Image: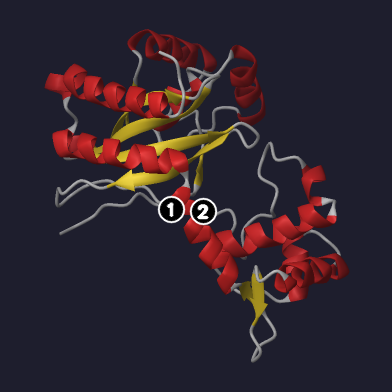
Amino acid sequence: MTTTRPPHPDPASPRGPGPHAPGEPRERGQSPVGRAFQVLRCLVESGDDWGVRELANHLGMPPSAAHRALGMLEDEGAVRRDPATGRYLLGFDFLRLARVATDSFPLWRAARPMLQELVGRRDETALMNIYDYQRMELFVAACVESTQPIRYTEQLHKWLPVHAGATGLAILAFLCEADRERVLDQRGLPALTERTVPDRETLDRALERIRADGYAVSRGQRVPGAAAIAAPIFDRHRVIGDIALTIPDFRYPEDHLEEVAADVISCARAVSAAHGANG
């Protein structure tokens, strides 16, 4: 069995760019709590161990501040120090709490059986994506895989843009105008593939169509060879993410797209209702 997983750059890798993603305010990291969270995020996203000076250089903070942050986290069991190397790793209590938090995440608990039902109907990989208004990016919060021998899956919890691919466009289309303009002004429209939407005029037409249809489709806009069909999910006030089927392009359901999209929309509406959306 072959599983096709599209590659993702890892901006939080130990040798990658610094900690502040575009749109992430720097002032969050200036308080002791903010710095501790920066340190913890770095350890989580890199999956590596770190020395104090190495970590301080990567995060752009004084070594003394990094050392204090690590000390605070070590006292609470969030990080631990390898006695042989003196380098810092995630603590066991943090790993325990992370698993408890994931398993008890109410939206995930509500969505999982609905995603499973969608996969049962279409036998393509189903995703639940969540949008972060501060970062102006989405991440894949849940995935139920297809049983097909060739299928697309997404790496969980990695930040992804919203300007390319159905999984992003289904969110972008339903942001309020001010939030949508903020995303486009600050993030622009960098081309991820030759099929990424190239300009604002084309994008505006695509978003208008998505709002009219209630779902987005894409073929190779973010990952070559991958297609997707996505519909937004809402809470009581605003769009919070979407439900998507991700499909190898050679299985794109051109002849019965509306039927498949109707199933995706139905799943998204059920997840929205479970999260308090009204209609």
Relative to 47, 253 lies left or right: left
The residue singled out by tag 1 in the image is 103
Quarter of the image with the C terminus is top left
Going by the numbered disc 2, the residue's amino acid type is Ala
Return the x and y of residue 158 as percentages of the image width and height. Answer: 49, 49
Q: CA distance from mark 2 to mark 1?
A: 6 Å
Q: Amino acid at mark 1?
A: Asp
- Residue in the image at 55% along x and 19% along y: 237
Do residues under tags 2 and 1 come within 8 Å of each other at their CB atoms? yes
Residue 247 spot, x, y in % from top left: 24, 38
In the rendered image, residue 238, in percent from the top left (x then y), is placed at 54, 20
Helix, strand or loop for disc 2: helix
Q: Is residue 235 left or right of residue 265?
A: right
Q: Residue at x 52, y 66 (%)?
A: 96
Q: Left or right? Give the position of 92 relative to 31.
A: left
Q: Residue at x 64, y 84 (%)?
A: 82
Residue under numbered circle 2: 101
| Residue depicted at x 31% and y 48% | 153
* 134 versus 46 height, above or below: above
